[in-house]
Image (spheres, rainbow, N blue to C red):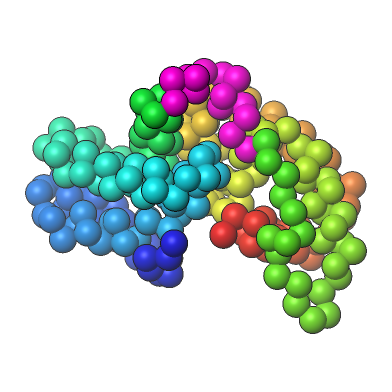
Amino acid sequence: MTLSNSKDPSGKDVDNLWERLRNGERKALDLLFRRFYDELFAYAYKIVPDEDLVKDSIQELFLELWRTKDRINKATSVNAYLLVSVRRIVLRSLEKERNRYKRNLTFVENLFEKDFTLNQLEIEEGEDESKKKEILRVLNRLNAKQKETIYLRYYHGLSNAEIAEVMDINYQSVKNNLSRAIKSLRVIVKSSADMMFLISLIKQIST
C-alpha cells in the first residue's frame, strides 16, 4: 500500500504546497498526493477494507482537488481537510455500490467495530507480550467512536477540533470520547513509559 514512507514536509511546507495548488501548480498536487497517500489509505481502509475502492476514492479526491483548485479555500489543517474529504468520498462510493449501506449514524458508529488483534503487532525481543495482550483487551472494550477518536489522535496527531471535523461530531463529544477512553486505559497505563508503549502499539495497529 505504501507509495511513500516520507512523513515530511513539515506543516509549514504542507501549507505552502496547498497554496501552490490553489494557484494552479500541478507539481504541488503531486507532492501532496505523495505526502498524504499512506495516511489517507490507512484511514479509509479502516472505514471499508476494500483496497480498490479506497484507491479509487483517493484518486477521486485528488482529481476533485485539481478540478476545484480555483474554488478551494485556505485550509486551517490540510491533514484534517483531506481526511474529511476521503471519508466523504468513501461513504459516497459505498452508497453507490451498495444501496443497503446509507450514510447514517448507525453505519458511522460501526466503522471501527472490528477488534484489534495481537497478530497486528510486531513482538520484538524483550518486549512484554502479556502487557500487549492486556492493552489490546482494554482497547477492544472501547466503543467504535472511542477507538476512532484514539486512532485519529495518536496515529494522525489531530487536535480535538480537527477530530470533530473529521468524525462530523461536536467538540464536546470528542472530549468525552477521549476522556472515557483514557479513563479505561489508565487501569493499565500507569506511567509515561506505559503511555509511550500504548502509543507505539496504536501506531502498529494503524499501519
Is residue 18 shown in magenta?
A: no
In the rendered image, residue 204, in percent from the top left (x then y), is placed at 64, 62
Classify 19 as above or below 179.
below
Which corner quadrant of the image does residue 93 belong to? Answer: top left
Any part of residue 103 in sight: no
Q: Is residue 64 left or right of residue 42?
A: left
Viewer-proximal residue among 130 and 90? 90
Classify 180 as above or below 99.
below
What residue is rendered at 52% in x and 45% in y?
A: 49
Classify 37 as above or below 50.
below
Viewer-proximal residue among 164 and 141? 141
Secondary structure, magenta segment, majority class: loop
Q: How many marks?
A: 0
Per the rendered image, the range of residues in magenta is 98-112
Q: Is residue 59 left or right of residue 178?
A: left
What residue is rendered at 61% in x and 46% in y?
A: 151
In the rendered image, residue 130, in percent from the top left (x then y), is placed at 90, 64
Q: Is residue 164 left or right of residue 41?
A: right
Which corner quadrant of the image does residue 30 belong to? Answer: bottom left
In the rendered image, residue 140, in percent from the top left (x then y), is placed at 78, 43
